[in-house]
Image: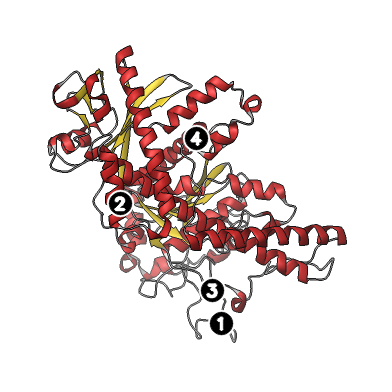
Amino acid sequence: MTEPNKKQLRAIDAPFVALGPSGVAIRDRLKHLTPQDEKVLRLVGDHLGCLASRDLKQRCADGLEHCADTWAARKRDLTAESSSRWAGSITKASHDQWALSRRCQAAHIDSLEAGVRTLRHRLCQPIGAKATKRAPGGYRSEHEWFMKSRRLAALECRLERERAEREAGIVHVVRGGRRLLGTRHNLAKAQLDEQEWRQRWEAERWFLQADGESGKRYGNETLRVTPEGEVSIKLPAPLAHLANARNGRYVLSARVAFAHRAEEWADRISANRAVAYRIHYDVPRGRWYLNASWQRPVVKTVPLEAARAKGMVGVDTNADHFAAYRLDACGNPVGDPHRFFYDLSGTAPHRDAQIRHAITRLLHWAEGAGVAAIGIEDLDFTAEKTREKHGRNKRFRQLISGMPTGRLKARLVSMAAEMDVSIVAVDPAYTSTWGAQHWQKPMSAPRRKTTRHDAASIAIGRRALGHPIRRRTTPPQHHQSDGAGYRTVQADRGTRGREETRRPVTDRAHDARARTGNIQGTRATSASKTVRDACSAGQRVQDPLLITDEERSPPRIRR
């Protein structure tokens, strides 16, 4: 297998150290709630949820004409029915939801454009034309060509509509989730009845979240949590008669005790720094939860040279496992390959738990190996998931869609930051091809089989370290010496002994007789076994000046 021509290769981006997490989120369960507590939470969530739905509708109607004046008018209308802080949280959530919908709309337009380009290219090719490494070929039959032409017309119509809506500032948002809304028409498949679906739908549309304020008591005036775990809520104006504390507040009987990052959270609220809280209800489990989140200051990343100082762990992401290999600072593989498996079948919480467990094992192994960074591909399959890209290869499309690129990137960066391990992102171009070409066969052994994924992890690690993926450069053309330049990239030019010949080895048993001139079949004089004679003989051998002329010349045999 030959390496592709360099003129046809695309430009490979330089590796970089990924930024650390910008925020922290923790959760705890609200236990031992009284029926009155649950009644108050449901009433507050339903009332604020109606206000949030109305405000989001108004924000979507404003579109691109939104400004600070319209924002202030919306907040002023909501304040009369809730409070100024509740109104600020609702309007900010509506604005964030609209911005998220705009980003999703732009990504959908990009996906449609990629599909249209591929369809147009393949329809222009002759029927039965073979594909190349750079572009797909034509369709296999006239029927398939006709069906794809109809799909092209549908995609072009859809693309034109999406572009027109984006220019007009129109977005489509569903409070509660579009997936849960679609489940209403497939209750039998979801194994739900109408009442259970209605409970989930109402719980998802409740609004019980408040942004924090620095300088206020315990960092949040609307949803306040004390260091002892007491939770109190500022009731909206129409529900102020339900208060059981001063200033229109309701104190829950439940207490929270965060098990994760408890000290960091306590230090933050003790300094009256902003902490955002959210209360939500899990209908299938019948439990109430409290989420706390806050932002972290921007932390400067470790320089790339410092991350490469102790070597690197190259990681190849696959559909069911991580293939990892440790490399030293010079790019040489050390030890055996490691694989960390996970199962992405089942529900979303199960998949997320599998990813977190695999990342935890990977980080612990990297920490034990003594490296300071992990090299991983900067994967993005946004434009590669369309069926126009891979044709009928539905199995391969499902494989790519199943790879947890977005969730993996977020989890890996946040979990590695807690263990002081840097993440170096590299360009994924040609890592699997060149890894298998240059490293799969040399790293294989009779008792160890190196897979294509293991070889790809070595290629990723070498690219993260700044070394070429190839093991050695091409030898000089005119002769085999180093007259035209250095032939190896394993050792730097300033390394001592780089150009020296190999040191001589000791005489072996099979050629020692030929060098000394002994005749086969005769037995030489045995060496003395006493300690004194052995020491004196060893001293004479080590110091050549102590050897006399008689000992250098062979003894003469008198006849």
Instruction: Choose between 460 and 25: the one closer to the eye.
Output: 25
Mark nearest the camera among 2 and 4 is 2
Mark nearest the camera among 2 and 3 is 2
Residue assigned mark 2:
71
Distance in Å between CA atoms under marks 1 and 3: 9 Å
Distance in Å between CA atoms under marks 2 and 4: 42 Å
Picture layout, residue 546 above or below residue 343: below
Instruction: Choose between 294 and 498: the one closer to the eye.
Output: 294
Distance in Å between CA atoms under marks 4 and 1: 50 Å
Query: Tag 3: residue type?
Result: Thr
Disc 1 to disc 3: CB gap under 8 Å: no
Instruction: Choose between 493 and 306: the one closer to the eye.
Output: 306
Residue found at the far right of this picture: 142
Disc 4 to disc 1: CB gap under 8 Å: no
Say whether residue 210 is left or right of residue 511.
Answer: left
Quadrant where the N terminus sits is bottom right
Q: Give the image quarter of residue 134.
A: bottom right
In the rendered structure, which disc, 4 or 1, sits on the residue that comes first in sequence?
Answer: 4
Distance in Å between CA atoms under marks 2 and 1: 70 Å
Residue assigned mark 4:
354
Instruction: Label 4: state its secondary structure.
Output: helix
Residue 473's disc number: 3
